Every structure is written in structure tokens, then in C-alpha cells.
Image (cartoon, grey):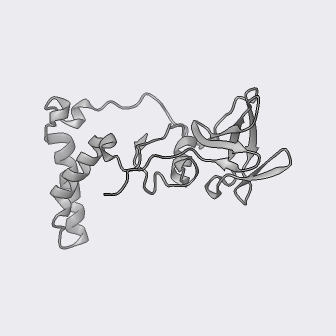
Amino acid sequence: MRSDNGPPFGCVGVGRLTRLSINLIKAGLITEWIRPGHPEENGRHERFHLTLKQEVANPPQATSELQIQSMSQFHEEYNFERPHEALGMRTPRSCYLSSTRIWNGILGSPEYDTKAMEVRKVGQSGCIWVKGQEHYIGQTLTGEYVGLKINQDDPREVHYGPVYLGKLNAKKGLEKPKMKVRRQR
């Protein structure tokens, strides 16, 4: 699932993980975030928001009931009546296919290859212990299990399921990967 970096999907913390993104991973989804400051990487989503804003938010309706009615009308028109250029002038409903995957409703912790990784539980303080040393990973991961990729030499790579969190340096702690952020003009 691709999203931007804002709440509730992402944050600036370790691995960009929020409680929601952790639960999405536990539900079997693979999370992906666009680069900060690059909305063009999620163009379809941004275009939808523009259309939604133009159709139902500017100006807003006088009451909540009227706003809900406006949103419902937009939903019907957008998905079932209005042709979309990006879909070859078809409606979204005419292109939609239900997923063949069935979710059992259970959030399962990520599984790790214990031959290639050591598994550690993140404690209440947001820390894990490695070789008798405490390392802060992040409060968001409290109670979750992380995988430490075993390398010939330190630092070890730290993962939460498919998400790379950084390298664990014995002296510096967790070194998060650098995120490229667009400079403000």
C-alpha cells in the first residue's frame, strides 16, 4: 500500500512506522511511502483529492447532513457514472476486481528467517537488548518483534517485517537511513 508520509500512515520516526502502518503490515500488506516532498509520486491519489475538494468541499455544505449527502452523491457519480480518462473512458466500477486473497481477521506478527536473523522483542521503553547492551529502536514498536540481520561484522541491519529500520551500531545505537527531503524555497 503506497501512501504519503503524514499521519496516520507515516511519520518521521523509525522506519516511518505508525501504529496504523504496523497493523497494516500485521494484516499482510506491504507498506510503501513516497519520498517526502514528492506528491507527484502518488499522482492518482493527489488528483482524486483535488477532484473531491472541488466537487464537495469548496464551498462546504451548510450542515453535516447536507455534506454527507453531497459526499454520497459524489461517491456514486465518481465510481459508477463518470468516465475516467486514465481508465480509457471507463468508470472505476467497470474496472474493479475483488481481491482473491481472503484475510482471516487476525493481525499476525511478521515472521523472520531465524537462520539469517536474530529476533528481539521491543520493550516498554522502546529498546532491545543485544550482547548485554540496550539500544533504543522506537516507542511505536513497543511489544513488537524486530529482526536483526546477522552480518559478519557489526553493524547489524534492523527490520520490522519488510521495513528496513537502520543499522545497529554498538557505539552509536540505531542509525536510521537518511531520508532525502526537498528543500523549501
Q: Quadrant of the N terminus?
A: top left
Q: Residue at x 18, y 36 (%)?
A: 91
Q: Residue at x 63, y 38 (%)?
A: 110
**Residue ranking furthest to the bottom:** 62
Q: Is residue 47 left or right of residue 104?
A: left
Q: Residue at x 40, y 43 (%)?
A: 34
How many numbered circles does the render carry? 0
Figure quadrant of residue 117: top right
Q: Residue at x 36, y 32 (%)?
A: 98
- Does residue 52 lie above or below 78 as drawn? below
Q: Nearer the viewer, residue 160 or 20?
A: 160
- Does residue 72 lie above or below 58 as drawn? above
Q: Is residue 76 left or right of residue 116?
A: left
x%, y% of residue 18? 53, 53
- Does residue 119 lie above or below 126 as drawn? above
Q: Nearer the viewer, residue 114 or 15?
A: 15
x%, y% of residue 49? 25, 52
Q: Nearer the viewer, residue 84 or 17?
A: 17
- Does residue 57 lie above or below 143 as drawn? below
Q: Quadrant of the C terminus?
A: bottom left
